[in-house]
Amino acid sequence: MSNFQSKIEVETTANSITKIYEKLQTKISTLRKARDRPLTISEKILIGHLAENIDFNSYDVLVRGKSYVILNPDRVALQDVTGQMTILQFMLAGLKRTAVPTTVHCDHLIQARLRSDLDTKAALYENNEVYQFLESASRKYGMGFWKPGAGIIHQVVLENYAFPGGLMIGTDSHTPNAGGLGMLAIGVGGLDAAEVMAGMSWEILYPKRIGVYLTGELNRWASPKDVILSVASKLTVSGGTNAIIEYFGPGARTVSCTGKATITNMGAEIGATCSVFSYDKRMETYLRATGRSAIADLANKHVDLLTQDQQIEEKICENRENSINYFDQLIEIDLSSLEPYIVGPHTPDLARPISKMAEDIKKYNYLDTISVALIGSCTNSSYEDMSRAADVAEQAREKGIKTKVPLQVTPGSEMIRATIERDGQMELLKDIGANVLANACGPCIGQWSRPELKKGEPNTIITSYNRNFPGRNDGRRETMNFIGSPELVIALALGGRLSFSPLTDELTAKDGTSFKLNPPKKAPEIPENGFKDVKDIYVPPADDPESVEVSINKNSDRLQKLEPFPKWDDKDFEKLPILAKVSGKCTTDQISPAGPWLMYRGHLDKISDNLLLGAVNAYHDGEVGSGKNTLNDKIESFPHIAREYKKRALKWIIVGDNNYGEGSSREHAAMTPRYLGCAAVVARSFARIHETNLKKQGVLALTFGDPMDYSKIMEDDRISIIGLNSLRPTKPVNCILHHVNGREEVLSLLHSYNESQLEWFRAGSALNILHAKEEAPD
Ligand code: SF4
């Protein structure tokens, strides 16, 4: 099967999009009647996807940053690491097919070692059972399966599935890439995705709105990448938290669709829920070039639903202060005067224009010599990006020079790779020394083997990727990673130094003369001769799903079929030991660390061996990852102790500090404690997503009525949580603290369960309820 969907598939998709637009129309008209004011694009899409009718006249609904909304997403996208547990959980629900269109993308597991063909072959061998599982499950449950080598999830989604006005969730933080095609696309945890795949709605904090008003037009070395790097420098890594970033203004309409996707992709770096542009001609061009004219025609008929109301831009153009009527914050960027940026190391908001880079290198003692330059990834490997990078390469080739440092290219998709191979950009890059890696994540996610680098050796790399926290690219914290646009990365690879500025510095040609690089020419946003149609990259759902068996080897240490968690036994929790009392920050990454555990994401038993390995014990001088085993009084690792308790059918408790479970929405952080016998987590406060994940997995999530009670809990105490049969929304829960000296204290605990969430607890998990519904006779 090829990268272009058949005419029939596009028409089928267009028919379902027609229904989505009808719903948008109805909901938006109702909102307009209640609130007579212009609407932004994110408001329209969110309202259009509400799962239930709400009273728009009420003042406590749609309160930005405060109230919650329940939505029905249109699509789900899964990648091959997080997708494993998502599908295993979906299977627990017992459905025959996914309730919403879903695709699976094999991109994260290919390790970059030598070059594309060899690396893909090695990945096929090493991850064979995971790929077999994903493919067989996709065929059985009606999901589209994109093979290893087909491309990176977000690029493939943009090329095939994103559409203006849609709402998508994906189990990857850069899902917002599809905002470049006018879609609200949001990264979520695997359990959220599994539930939506199983037909449940999805709840989200009604987000704040940050407007980015773009004027002017990009020119010379400045590119879409520099727009988002500039926004990141203004908002910082947490500035977008719980907000949707909406780009608008005359400048927005000058940026190509794929350029917009680069900008929305990297909204993840500032913590934004997602980012979005209104539908425009550039999106229409891209839809038509990727074989989706029927969808472009449909979008053209519904422009009013897919764009910010015009009055907003007019009012803000008149007076910036008018923005308070529509946005919580406004940023303005004049594209015409934007300089190219370099950000890093180690954080994407450490930004400076290239003209200031040399100064920063001296000031902060950064290593000037570049060890490797890398372009591509899901963020920056569009036809336009590669054409501008190739323009710089061509200038070097004409002067007979090559890059001074190794240059790696990771194309975003096979369609892009084949098209730039055909149109000559790849040849130009190879001519100056580029090596082409697989169409996969590779060095963007630590899947990069660098045997030439000595252990602990500090070095500088420059990439056009999106993330640069320590260890992100090659697993080595000493690697200092800087980020810039692809064309800038090529220029720096030719200069060989981080301090090289193509704006001012000269290179030496083969004949010894000096020359300056010209800014890359304006590049075509789509290929003149169309994108190349490539085959054998996609496996559709099976016509006879009943005959497909999902492939899970019983002896595998990568995959394990999930068993439903047991129902609550109607009994109070009596005198349970405390596995861990955690002190200070405890993120989901501290509860269920990543790194080497990445390969066990599909095997609950195996990955449970990482439980709380990053958590700081409130006792024993802040010991990390271990505590006292009450069975033998020895200090042992938390997962080991939990397993000992589990063996004896002994339930146990975690005591958390403030904002327990902050960070990513990783569901393993709730599943592994539940699997090993955690009955309850009692914390000073919870990060909301983790609290919901605990509830969904059947772990009782409680908070201290008086946060000071946290300090009353001693290491050897036993805890009873009583009156569970009369658990009700808003009603406090009683807890008895049994101190080792026989003294008892009664504490009042609080919870945020509503009635249906209490059902999750009683049933053993949220998915058990879905499963029971499926089993029930009609
Ligand atoms: S290329 Fe990088 S950012 Fe994109 S999906 Fe892969 S790992 Fe994530």
Image (cartoon, grey):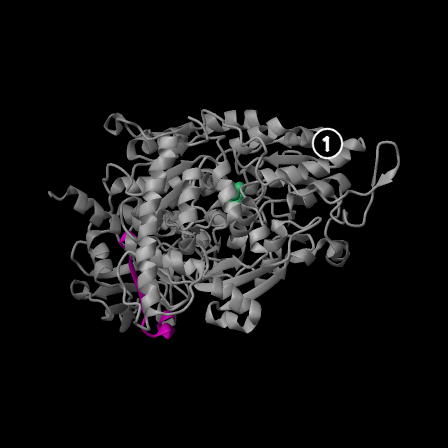
Question: Is 546 placed above or below 622 here?
Answer: above
Q: Residue farthest to the right?
A: 512
Which of 4/299 is in front? 299
Which of 265/521 is in front? 521
Label 1: few (<14), some (14–19) or many (≥20) C-alpha neighbours in 10 Å: many
Establish whether ligand 1 lies closer than 8 Å to the Cβ of label 1: no
User: Which residue is denoted by mark 1 in the rendering?
Assistant: 432
Q: Residue farthest to the front?
A: 301
Residue drawn 30% across the image and 48% down it: 195
Task: Give the amino acid type for the residue marked by disc 1 in the picture.
Answer: Ile
In the rendered image, residue 685, in percent from the top left (x then y), is placed at 38, 66
In the rendered image, residue 589, in percent from the top left (x then y), is placed at 45, 52
Q: Which residues are magenta?
A: 697-710
* Label 1 residue SS: loop
Q: Is residue 438 magenta?
A: no
Which of 473/76 is in front? 76
Which part of the image, by quadrant, shows the C terminus? Answer: top left
Left or right: 713 with respect to 765? right
Residue drawn 32% across the image and 33% down it: 137
Can residue 457 be seen at all in this image of the molecule?
no
